[in-house]
Image: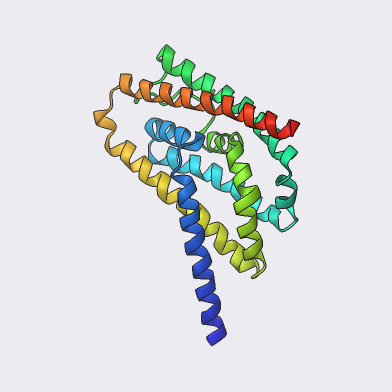
Amino acid sequence: QQAYWGDQVNLGAIFGSSFVLGLSGAMMPGSLLVVNINETSRRGIVGGVLAVTGHAVLELLVVAGFAFGLGGVLAHERVAGGIGLVGSAVLAWMAYGIIRSAWRGDVSLETTGSDAQNHLGPLAAGSLATVSNPYWMLWWASIGAAYAALALGRGPAALWAFYVGHISSDFAWYLLVSLVIITGKKFISDRLYRGLLLSCGVFLAGLAVYFVWTGTTMVLG
């Protein structure tokens, strides 16, 4: 009985610490935030939740991969640099689509038929936003890999607690963002909305340029 409760406390500690750790990353601006704002504004709370779900599915695959030593492979500097270069190209593509749609006025708060991410659904857009951000992979190759290894050493239940705690922070943060977008939607004009998207597109373009520089530096050593 005592051992049982000790295990539950350990699992709770892993869940709580991974939640806080994940929240610190989720609150940083990035491509997933852009997608969450866009999909929530266009499709409501379901769109925002589906975008984060696409992100969650990929993270589940990564956590599962740690059982087979994936972290050590991704931690290699040239591999990380290659990820940065590929990610920069995808980020640039997403930035172009967002900027073009906002500049041409193809999107509005009432629009439901077209999509700023080249007709991607929210689930696919969330997944693409995740894999196109090199820092996501680098985070998992360093901090995420270390924590997952620690949890895995305590058994499969601990690794599951790590994943659930981590992804819960993403859902909690982006759900809050979605609620803010929904409740404030009536105060946002289409012009302001397009300006927000344009700013987000420029932000992604800037990230793409930065990732080209850092990725090239890491590949060339």
Is residue 165 visible from the viewing direction of this image? yes
User: Residue 78, relative to residue 102: is it above or below?
Assistant: below
Q: Nearer the viewer, residue 208 or 196?
A: 208
In this rendering, is residue 213 above or below 138? above
Residue drawn where x is 56% and y is 35% of the image: 124
Query: Left of 102 or right of it: where is 82?
Result: right
* 216 left or right of 28 in image: right
* Residue found at x 75% / y 47%: 73
Above/below status of 218 relative to 171:
above
Q: Residue at x 59, y 62 (%)?
A: 160
Image location of residue 205, percent across then percent down: 53, 23
Total number of numbered labels? Answer: 0
* Residue at far bottom of view: 1
Quadrant for the N terminus in the image? bottom right
The one nearer the camera, 171 or 47, is 171
Horizontal and vertical percent position of residue 198: 42, 21
Q: Position of residue 164 (x, y in %)?
A: 53, 58
Q: Residue at x 39, y 24 (%)?
A: 111
| Residue 213: % across, % down | 63, 27
| Whether residue 1 is visible | no
Q: Is residue 132 left or right of residue 189?
A: right
